């Protein structure tokens, strides 16, 4: 993959002024001295036996059930869902294996009631992902779905269909896992949820979807190439593309660009963009600082947000996720008119991307483009690690700690008060 800076207005000073901080940050990340940095070395020293155990468990699940439900929220499901949505056929056209559903990612009674209807009469397996076991959304969903399994199979048989990914030694879910004998995997102590895609948290559901997790890990070992650099910027290539991207983002932020718009032209990237929103929003948004991550699906959102992007308040820059070779295509029929007839649909889509980019550059909007060769497990792994590294370095450049989320607890505290008091507003 290549990340192209040629349309971004990033000059050499953007990196040169930050070079010392970036170098120290990269060394610090690789040293393992900071908490929650286990993800940094993970693609290069993962345990092959653990990955094999994940693959074997996935094969068993694929033979056990028609419906596999992943119970989790935030980093406990977004990475896996990003891979599954990106790398499997849409419209429910799974090629073998169970249909995969997600629960515990919201508090909608309607959503979960309809999910229970959808799995009625099907053989079901659950994968519950939670460090503590007490997070409200997955706690409610797991309790509800576990009761469904108890009624359908009985407690003992249900336990053989529940897979837990949780803390290695403590917490309510770990206690239940030991007591009930669930097959389990560990959420590493030194890796936070949004950085956990390449751990069992992401790899088990991804493997159940029939996706090659070995290829994902192989891709994560490969650097993204920086392209479109001036000769002066090329002098900083030793820092890596993620560092140059982090420096560019920091430069934009200091110049008043407080929103980053992730734009994609393939709908299969929807949940990758959702994962990016969590990764950057939760990592950077502290102490009154941070770039607000937004995501738009083009060309659909051009018909709602295109006007603002072209002529609105330019407090944003754009990062395009550009798929160079989509897996499938169709030819536009003659009835669509002379301009479009006989062209491939992907050709028209690419023309839209190039046209939007040209128009936005004319309006002075900085644009960075990530060229993704294809939607493959290898490229998914490469993207995950690239953005994780870029996000961590961006946090250090901002002067915030990128691996915690203290502000998340505020709403939870207030919600508990409401639930205890029964008050309404």
Image (spheres, rainbow, N blue to C red):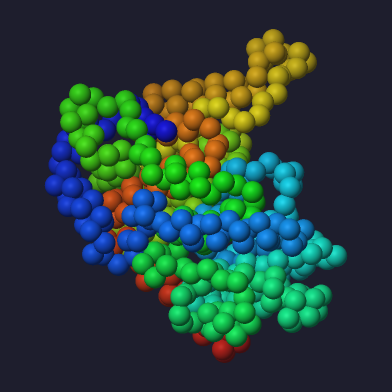
Residue situated in front as seen by the camera: 72 or 332: 72
Q: Quadrant of residue 16?
A: top left
Residue at image point 49% right, 23% down:
354
Q: In the displayed image of the protein, which residue is found farthest to the top?
A: 338
Residue at image point 49% right, 77% down:
132
Q: In the displayed image of the protein, which residue is found farthest to the front?
A: 49
Residue 32: tell me if it is visible: yes
Residue at image point 60% right, 43% down:
87
Where is residue 131 drawn, in percent x and y?
Answer: 48, 73
Where is residue 52 drawn, in percent x and y?
Answer: 53, 57
Q: In the displayed image of the protein, which residue is found farthest to the right?
A: 121
Image quadrant in which the N terminus is located: top left
Residue situated in front as seen by the camera: 23 or 275: 23
Along the horizontal axis of the image, is 162 left or right of 24?
A: right
Residue at image point 44% right, 42% down:
219
Along the horizontal axis of the image, is 28 left or right of 220?
A: left
Is 335 above or below relative to 412?
above
Q: Quadrant of residue 424?
A: bottom right
Is 329 above or below relative to 247?
above
Q: How many marks?
A: 0
Residue situated in front as seen by the camera: 206 or 320: 206
Where is residue 337 drawn, in percent x and y?
Answer: 72, 13
Image quadrant in which the C terminus is located: bottom right
Residue 141: tell me if it is visible: no
Is 343 above or below relative to 15?
above
């Amino acid at each position: 993959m290549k990340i192209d800076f040629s349309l971004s207005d990033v000059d050499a000073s953007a990196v040169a002024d930050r070079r010392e901080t970036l170098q120290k940050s990269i060394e610090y990340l690789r040293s393992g001295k900071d908490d929650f940095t286990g993800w940094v070395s993970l693609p290069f020293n993962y345990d092959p036996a653990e990955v094999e155990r994940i693959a074997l468990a996935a094969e068993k699940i694929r033979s056990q059930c028609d419906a596999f439900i992943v119970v989790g929220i935030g980093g406990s499901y977004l990475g896996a869902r990003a891979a599954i949505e990106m790398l499997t056929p849409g419209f429910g056209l799974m090629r073998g294996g169970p249909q995969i559903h997600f629960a515990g990612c919201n508090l909608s009674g309607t959503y979960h009631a309809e999910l229970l209807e959808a799995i009625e009469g099907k053989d079901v397996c659950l994968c519950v992902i939670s460090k503590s076991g007490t997070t409200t959304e997955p706690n409610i969903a797991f309790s509800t779905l576990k009761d469904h399994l108890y009624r359908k199979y009985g407690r003992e048989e249900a336990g053989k269909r529940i897979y837990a990914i949780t803390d290695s030694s403590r917490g309510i879910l770990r206690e239940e896992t030991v007591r009930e004998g669930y097959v389990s995997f560990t959420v590493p102590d030194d890796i936070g949820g949004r950085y956990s895609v390449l751990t069992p948290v992401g790899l088990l559901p991804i493997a159940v979807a029939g996706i090659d997790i070995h290829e994902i890990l192989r891709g994560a070992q490969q650097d993204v190439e920086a392209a479109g650099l001036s000769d002066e910027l090329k002098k900083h290539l030793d820092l890596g593309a993620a560092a140059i991207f982090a420096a560019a983002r920091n430069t934009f932020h200091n110049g008043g660009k407080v929103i980053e718009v992730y734009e994609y032209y393939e709908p299969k990237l929807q949940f990758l963009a959702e994962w990016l929103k969590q990764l950057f929003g939760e990592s950077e948004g502290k102490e009154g600082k941070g770039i607000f991550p937004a995501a738009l699906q083009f060309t659909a959102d051009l018909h709602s947000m295109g006007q603002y992007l072209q002529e609105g308040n330019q407090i944003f820059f754009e990062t395009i996720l550009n798929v160079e070779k989509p897996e499938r295509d169709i030819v536009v029929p003659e009835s669509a008119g002379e301009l479009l007839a006989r062209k491939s649909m992907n050709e028209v889509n690419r023309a839209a991307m190039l046209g939007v980019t040209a128009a936005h550059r004319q309006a002075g909007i900085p644009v960075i483009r990530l060229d993704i060769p294809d939607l493959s497990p290898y490229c998914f792994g490469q993207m995950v690690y690239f953005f994780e590294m870029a996000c961590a370095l961006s946090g250090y450049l901002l002067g915030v700690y990128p691996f915690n989320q203290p502000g998340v607890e505020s709403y939870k505290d207030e919600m508990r008060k409401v639930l205890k008091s029964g008050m309404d507003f």
